[in-house]
Amino acid sequence: MSTRRTSNGMHTYTGDARNDLVSMTGSVSVGLPRMRPTALNAVLVCVMVLAPCPPPGAGQESPPPIYYELYSWKDSKTGEWNFSLLYNTNRNKTVKEVFNKRRVLRGVDNLKVRLSVIPRGSHVVWFDQLTFNGAKAKGSEALAYPPEGIVNEVRRYARSRNIEVVAPLASPAPEVRDRHGPP
C-alpha cells in the first residue's frame, strides 16, 4: 500500500508501518500538513521571536562575593571613630597597612562613602584586633568596635547597598551616656 496526498496537504496512511512513517519524499511525517520551506522558515522565525527568553545571565552562577576587612578605632585626640576598609587577602594585615594615613576613613560618613563604591553583594568582615601568632600585634591596641549605635548604623547602610557586614563577633561597646544628660 502507498500514501497519497489529500487536497488539504495531509497524507493518508494505509496501515503499513513503513509507509506510515515515511512520506513520499522520504522524510518522517507525523500527520502535519506539508509546508514549503519558506512557510516553515516563517513559522520557525515566529516561534523563536515569540518564545519566552530567559533573562540575561539566567542559568549562570553569580560570581563569588568579594570580601573586605574593616578595622575601627577611636581617635584619642578628637574622639571620632576612624575606619580602615581593606581588601581581604590570604594573609594577616600589618599595623602599618591598617593605620595607613592615606587609607584612614575619618568618621562614619566617610566610611559610608567608601562602602557606596564597593560592589553590591560584597562581604565586609569587621575586626577589632590584629593578631600575630595568636597574640595582639604591637601597635594595634587602639582597635575596637564602636558603640552599638554606630555598628547598627553601618550595618543598616551596608544592607541598603546589598553588602553584608559580618561581625562584630563580640558585643560592641554600649552607648556611653553623659552623667548629666538624660538617662
Image (cartoon, rainbow, N blue to C red):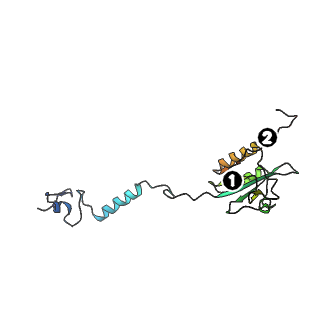
Q: Nearer the viewer, residue 112 or 86?
A: 86
SS category of the residue bearing label 2: loop
Q: What's the mark number on residue 175? A: 2
Q: Nearer the viewer, residue 120 or 85?
A: 85
Residue in the picture at 87% in, 35% down: 179
Quadrant in the rendering for residue 19: bottom left
SS category of the residue bearing label 1: strand
Farthest bottom residue in view: 26
Q: What's the mark number on residue 125? A: 1
Residue 162: x and y, percent?
A: 63, 50
> Circle 1: is it few (<14), some (14-19), or many (20+) Cα within 10 Å?
some
Q: Is residue 172 above or below residue 39?
A: above
Residue 105: x and y, percent?
A: 78, 55
Three-letter code for the amino acid on which mark 2 is drawn:
Glu
Q: Are marks 2 and 1 in contact (CB under 8 Å)?
A: no
Q: Nearer the viewer, residue 29 or 180?
A: 180
Q: What's the mark number on residue 51? A: none
Q: Nearer the viewer, residue 87 or 22?
A: 87
Q: Earlier in the sequence, mark 2 or mark 1?
A: 1
Residue 99: x and y, percent?
A: 80, 59
Q: Is residue 29 above or below residue 153?
A: below
Placement of the C terminus among the 4 image quadrants: top right
Marks counted in the figure total: 2
